[in-house]
Image: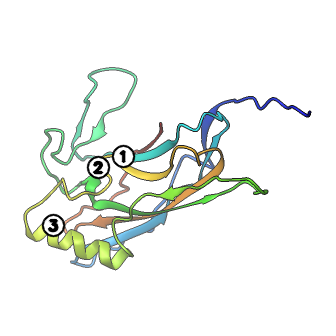
Amino acid sequence: MITTNVIGAALTMEQTAQFVALSDVTLNGSPQVSSGAINQVTVTNARGNGVGWTVTGFVTDFGAPGGPTTDPDGPGPLPPVPDCGFLGGTPDRLCIPGDNLGWSPSAVVAHATIPGDVAAVTAGPAHAVDAVDWLSQLTTAGAAGTVNGLGGLNEPNVLCSAAAGVDGGTFTCDATLWLGVPASAGTGTYTGVLTLTLT
């Protein structure tokens, strides 16, 4: 008889860098798309309990200097965030709604596989097939008078996940990003905060 003990450890998430710079946009009188990608996310699940896991993403509105902000947590260590109206602020030319940011996630098993490995990962649903499709969806939403609530990243969206029983190992998750920039946008450097959460 031969025996061995397999001992579990932790569930962790790492990202290669914190900051993402999307492509520049030169105003031309029409709405446009600024494109880029998140920095790769690595999930390592060494728990061995077969519970499953999910990574979700949520973004604030994007603001340029001088744009409207709000402090949802009140005075404290966290700075105010841009507010295009979703949190009670007033829409402004120096604020781009967070729902104007869409993504197309991808995910792969990153560890070497040997016989008996059952690991599998699923990318979250894409908002569009490409930048042109995303801009078309935003244009339709704009014609309907929608500012927020389109279904972009201003609400939690799944980046990647692994189901119970096939969730162990190391996985990488990526996503292409598209930010719709209104034709009426003011000049400046717009900043928003994308928060990724592992559960």
Q: Residue at x 51, y 41 (%)?
A: 53
Q: Is residue 133 visible?
A: yes
Disc on the earlier residue, 1 or 2: 1
x then y, percent, for residue 97: 24, 54
Position of residue 14 measured from the top left corner of the image (x, y, whole percent): 61, 42
Q: Is residue 24 visible?
A: no
Q: Are marks 1 and 3 in contact (CB under 8 Å)?
A: no
Residue at the disc numbered 2: 154
Q: Is residue 77 left or right of residue 93?
A: right
Between 189 and 164, the residue placed more toward the observer is: 164
Mark 2: secondary structure: loop
Q: Amino acid at mark 2?
A: Asn
Which of the two discs, 1 and 3, labels the residue nearer the N terminus?
1
Callouts 1 and 2 close, C-beta under 8 Å: yes
Local packing at callout 3 (Cα closer than 10 Å; few below 14, some 14-19, many 20+) is: some
CA distance for labels 1 and 2? 6 Å
Which percent across, then down, holds residue 192? 37, 48
Instruction: Identify the mark at residue 58; answer none if there is no mark.
Output: 1
Left or right: 28 in relation to 8: left
Mark 3: which amino acid? Ala
Q: Earlier in the sequence, mark 2 or mark 3?
A: 3
Helix, strand or loop for disc 1: strand
Q: Amino acid at mark 1?
A: Phe
Q: Which residue is mark 3?
A: 141
